[in-house]
Amino acid sequence: MHHSEVFIETKPHAIADAMRCQLNCHSTLLLMRILLVEDEVKTVQIIQQGLEEQHYQVDVAYDGPMGLQLAMRHPYQLIITDIILPGFNGLELCKKIREAKLATPVLMLTALGTTDDKIIGLDAGADDYLAKPFEFRELLARIRALSRRGTTPLVTSNVLRIADLEMDLSMKSVTRQGKTIPLTAKEFALLEYFIRHQGRVISKVELAEKIWDITFDTGTNVIEVYVNFLRKKIDKDFSTKLLHTHIGMGYVLKIVN
Ligand code: CA
């Protein structure tokens, strides 16, 4: 085979791989995850859409208690909260977050914009304050400023995720819907491989090479056994199944709609 043929043959795959890597790196390493706590649907839509266009990942809570629950459960790099909310308000939310020793920067958004309100917000533990109505680019500028002095490093986040499953590579922990799932080292490596290549069917041959560092022997069922262990742990107790078998081809980790 000529060298040039090999090059032409492999090029589209190489590009696809590079793109996939870029997407993965983007979603797992560079994406800043923001919690937005706001009860006005219209405002939520505008902010969420605008931030997602800027490649921020946005989760929304429509009241104080839900905001607190999400803030406790996920490692957000920033919390944007309105002040007047159902349940308890943004000031209380901020106090509760600080009482829970979460250092996540908080940006308060509110229609109230007098100096007194600002002081109350900052006293409650907010890091910055933005009065509605505001220009979107000002919101973006505040977010950039807060993320620069943020206490959580934004680009070194070691959390991989698919749907409601989260994998913290530094802590070596896996949770689904906030519940901890204990995995063995091999299961952890397997899940990490699946999650980094989510959406792609992965053959047993590939898993044997990448996870076990062995050449796949059709006589062994070790891979099937481990995939089944993993599947039981991450999927069995949840209605949305993530790990799927493609008979004769391999396995794929994906969200099936
Ligand atoms: Ca409100």
Image (cartoon, rainbow, N blue to C red):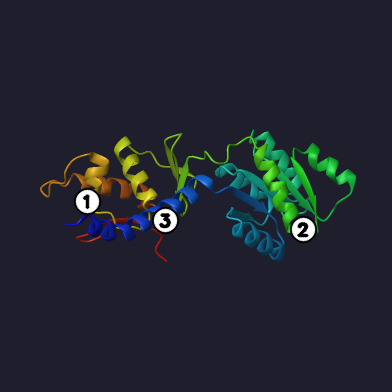
Q: Which mark is residue 24?
A: none
Residue 204, given in percent of the width and then of the height, sits at 22, 51
Quadrant of the picture in which ligand 1 is shown: bottom right
Quadrant in the picture for residue 38: bottom right
Q: Nearer the viewer, mark 3 or mark 1?
A: 3
Q: Work out how far the residue at label 3 is from the one at label 1, CA to CA, in angstroms.
A: 24 Å
Q: Which mark is residue 19?
A: 3
Q: Residue at x 49, y 50 (%)?
A: 26
The residue nearer to you, when weighing 15 against 155, is 15
Q: Residue at x 69, y 39 (%)?
A: 96
Ligand 1 under 8 Å from disc 1 Cβ = no
- For disc 2, the marked residue is 135
Quadrant in the picture for residue 62: bottom right
Q: In this rendering, does residue 242 appear at all?
A: no
Amino acid carrying label 2: it is Glu
- For disc 1, the marked residue is 204
Q: Say if 11 sits above or below 226 in the image.
A: below
Q: In this rendering, does residue 193 appear at all?
A: yes
Q: Work out how far the residue at label 2 is from the one at label 3, CA to CA, in angstroms.
A: 33 Å
Label 2 Cα crowd, 10 Å radius (few <14 / some 14-19 / many 20+): few
Q: Nearer the viewer, mark 1 or mark 2?
A: 2
> Is label 3 in contact with label 1 (beta carbons under 8 Å)?
no
Which of the two discs, 3 and 1, labels the residue nearer the N terminus? Answer: 3
Amino acid carrying label 1: it is Lys
Q: Is residue 211 left or right of residue 41?
A: left
> Is label 1 in contact with label 2 (beta carbons under 8 Å)?
no
